[in-house]
């Protein structure tokens, strides 16, 4: 990758990491479900009128919108509102890589390699360490909500893989249109109309700024830039940068929110990030199959080129023979016409 592209990848992960601190600030202004609904509303408008029509089927847009927008972000915002620290949330969500592998195995039949299984076990050990530390210091129920959000993220990853959107920004903007009404309905039912009205009536510049950041900076810019990088570099080159998200998440939470990072949390971070890194490695089996397919395609192409060459040579030979034959016949006819005496002498 070019240095400018590396800088862009790091910038996107920094934006996503700081996003957890911004969410924590925004939850001081809005109820969690209303905040999540506003995030997607502002992300969708007016961008939906600028990105063009959807480039995948609506069934994928709706299914990803429900799994990612309603379930994942709804659970994340509620969990953080219930007391889950911002920095730890950015770390625990990375377990989505394990859930993605499990769902891909169950739905797509993708068998994880031994290295990937080892990575999943290491990441789960990190989650267990974080759970013990959080259970002793904070609400374990909020921790469970964020883990459930990571599971929903894994489901949305598999759905997105099936959708295979050619334009990540176009896809994300249209996905953002789906969660708005369900989240607003849930907010009215769970949080109550009066609480929502009070939050909107008390809106100030800080509250509006948090909505703009999580909508336009995190969603529109973040996913747009990430998709731009993926169109120019292999996913195996770009994806590892996402491991920087919890680094920026925990650092920004410690810097701006004063969240402490205990030795147990550092241990959990090392296990989780290391496990996710192992689980994200491409399997040798997959590379071997790909290499085999490339070899087979190369042999096939070589055979086809050889056959085409033989056909061309045969055609050229046939053409030459026909030309020679025509020439010989033409010469014979010309000779015969020259030796034959005409029956009648033409009048001059």
Image (cartoon, rainbow, N blue to C red):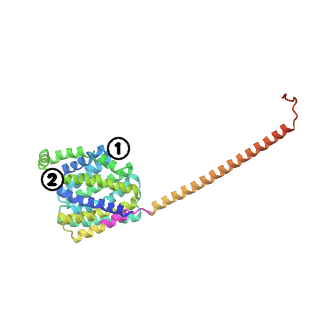
Q: Are marks 1 and 2 in contact (CB under 8 Å)?
A: no
Question: Is there any visible trace of residue 298 in the rendered image?
Answer: yes
Point out the image quarter for the C terminus.
Answer: top right
- Which residue has dot 1 on it? 54
Name the residue located 39 percent from the left edge and 61 percent from the top edge.
236
Q: Quadrant of residue 9?
A: bottom left
Dot in front, 1 or 2: 2
Q: Name above or below for residue 207 compared with residue 254.
A: above
Residue 66: image location, x then y, percent: 28, 47
User: Which type of secondary structure does the marked residue at label 2 adopt?
Assistant: helix
- Magenta-span inclusion, residue 16: no
Res 232 → quadrant: bottom left
Work out whether residue 105 or residue 227 is closer to the camera in this orientation and state it. 227
Residue density around tag 1, few if under 14, some if 14–19, many if 20 or more, within 10 Å = some
**Of the residues under marks 1 and 2, which one precedes in the sequence?**
1
Give the x, y percent position of residue 343. 88, 30
| Magenta residue span | 272-283
At x 35% / y 44%, what residue is drawn? Answer: 54
List x then y, in percent, for residue 7. 33, 63
Query: Is 42 on the left-hand or right-hand side of 56?
Result: left
Residue 138, which numbered label?
none
At x 23%, y 70%, the residue is 264
Q: Helix, strand, or loop for circle 1?
A: loop
Residue at the bottom extreme of this rendering: 263
- Is 217 on the left-hand or right-hand side of 202? right
> Which x, y percent locates residue 183?
22, 46
Q: Is residue 121 visible?
A: no
Measure the alpha-carbon separation of dots 1 and 2.
33 Å
Is 27 placed left or right of 219 in the picture?
left
The kind of secondary structure the magenta stretch mainly shows is helix
Is 277 one of the magenta-colored residues? yes
Q: Which residue is mark 2?
A: 205
């Amino acid at each position: 990758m070019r240095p400018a592209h590396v800088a862009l990848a790091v910038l996107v992960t920094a934006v996503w990491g700081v996003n957890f601190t911004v969410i924590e600030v925004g939850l001081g202004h809005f109820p969690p479900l209303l905040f999540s609904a506003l995030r997607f509303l502002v992300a969708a408008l007016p961008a939906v009128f600028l990105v063009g029509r959807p480039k995948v089927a609506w069934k994928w847009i709706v299914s990803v919108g429900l799994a990612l927008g309603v379930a994942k972000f709804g659970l994340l915002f509620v969990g953080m509102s219930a007391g889950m620290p911002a920095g730890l949330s950015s770390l625990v969500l990375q377990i989505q890589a394990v859930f993605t592998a499990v769902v891909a195995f169950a739905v797509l039949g993708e068998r994880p390699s031994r290295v990937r299984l080892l990575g999943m076990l290491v990441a789960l050990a990190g989650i267990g360490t974080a759970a013990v530390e959080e259970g002793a210091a904070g609400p374990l129920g909020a921790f469970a909500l964020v883990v459930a959000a990571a599971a929903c993220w894994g489901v949305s990853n598999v759905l997105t893989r099936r959708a295979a959107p050619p334009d990540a920004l176009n896809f994300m903007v249209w996905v953002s249109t789906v969660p708005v009404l369900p989240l607003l309905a849930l907010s009215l039912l769970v949080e109550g109309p009066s609480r929502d009205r009070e939050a909107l009536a008390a809106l100030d510049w800080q509250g509006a700024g948090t909505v703009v950041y999580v909508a336009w900076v995190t969603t529109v810019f973040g996913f747009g830039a990430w998709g731009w990088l993926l169109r120019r570099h292999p996913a195996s080159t770009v994806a590892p940068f996402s491991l920087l998200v919890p680094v920026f998440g925990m650092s920004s939470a410690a810097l701006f929110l004063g969240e402490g990072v205990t030795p147990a949390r550092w241990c959990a971070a090392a296990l989780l990030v290391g496990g996710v890194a192992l689980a994200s490695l491409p399997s040798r089996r997959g590379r071997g199959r790909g290499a085999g397919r490339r070899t087979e395609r190369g042999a096939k192409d070589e055979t086809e080129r050889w056959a085409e060459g033989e056909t061309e040579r045969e055609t050229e030979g046939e053409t030459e023979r026909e030309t020679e034959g025509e020439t010989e016949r033409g010469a014979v006819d010309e000779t015969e016409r020259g030796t034959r005496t005409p029956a009648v002498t033409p009048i001059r």
